[in-house]
Amino acid sequence: MKRDGRIICEKKSRELEEVCRRNGLALTIQRRAILESLASRFDHPTADQVYEDISGRIKGISRTTVYRVLETFVEIGLAKKISNPESKARFDADTARHHHLTCTTCGAVLDLFDDALNNLPLPAGIEKDFEIRDYSITFTGLCSACVAERVKISIDSG
């Protein structure tokens, strides 16, 4: 199942207004631009990538503001922070349960929607030691572009 960026942006814009009101946060131009940038991307950008997207449109915005706003979005449920092998925080505006494929060569992070993964049985007895509120699974490997490049290099050198 693919995401429709236009629909996600519209939905997230409405959600931003509602969540800001509920949390007593001002609905600023910066917050709107940062969420629009995040929701329109499918590559799970870092804060620096979001900053690069909007710095030309919002005069005087700082990296610190982008970092703070993204962290606020995570806290209020508008975005998720995705962990990955690079150890750089990446962000995703799609907060519905889904999973990820992470390329260990180029760092690409791709969405994976699979209902079977959404309904995994939890280990027996875990609730005594830990209250699970959500989960996501990250598969690591090589994206198709990196596999193709590896094959090309192999053919060229062989």
Image (tube, grey):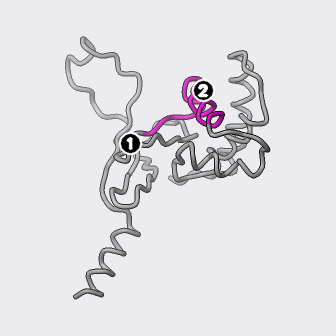
Q: Local crowd at mark 1 within 10 Å, few (<14), some, or many (≥20)?
A: few
**Residue located beneath label 1 in the image:** 87
Q: Residue at coordinates 35% horizontally, 44% vertically from top-left?
A: 138
Q: Local crowd at mark 2 within 10 Å, few (<14), some, or many (≥20)?
A: some
Q: Nearer the viewer, mark 1 or mark 2?
A: 1
Measured from the top left, where is residue 14 in percent x and y? 74, 33
Q: Residue at coordinates 56% horizontally, 34% vertically from top-left?
A: 79
Find out whether residue 74 is within the magenta segment. yes
Quadrant position of the C terminus in the picture: bottom left
Cα separation, mark 1 vs mark 2, equals 20 Å
Instruction: Look at label 1 and name its amino acid.
Output: Ser
Q: Residue at coordinates 70% horizontally, 17% vertically from top-left?
A: 22
**Residue located beneath label 2 in the image:** 72
- In the picture provided, is 152 more to the left or to the right than 67? left
Q: Main secondary structure of the magenta part?
A: helix
Between 118 and 141, the one nearer to me in the picture = 141
Secondary structure of the residue carrying numbered label 2 = helix
- In the picture provided, is 80 more to the left or to the right than 158? right
Measured from the top left, where is residue 19 in percent x and y? 68, 23
Above or below, 108 against 16 in this view is below
Find out whether residue 66 is within the magenta segment. yes
Measured from the top left, where is residue 74 in percent x and y? 55, 29
Instruction: Look at label 2 and name its amino acid.
Output: Thr
Query: Mark 1 or mark 2: which comes first in sequence?
Result: 2
> In the rendered image, which quarter is residue 33 located in?
top right
In the rendering, which numbered label is found on residue 157? none
Q: Residue at coordinates 66% horizontally, 47% vertically from top-left?
A: 37
Residues drawn in magenta: 64-82
Between 121 and 138, the one nearer to me in the picture = 138
Secondary structure of the residue carrying numbered label 1 = loop
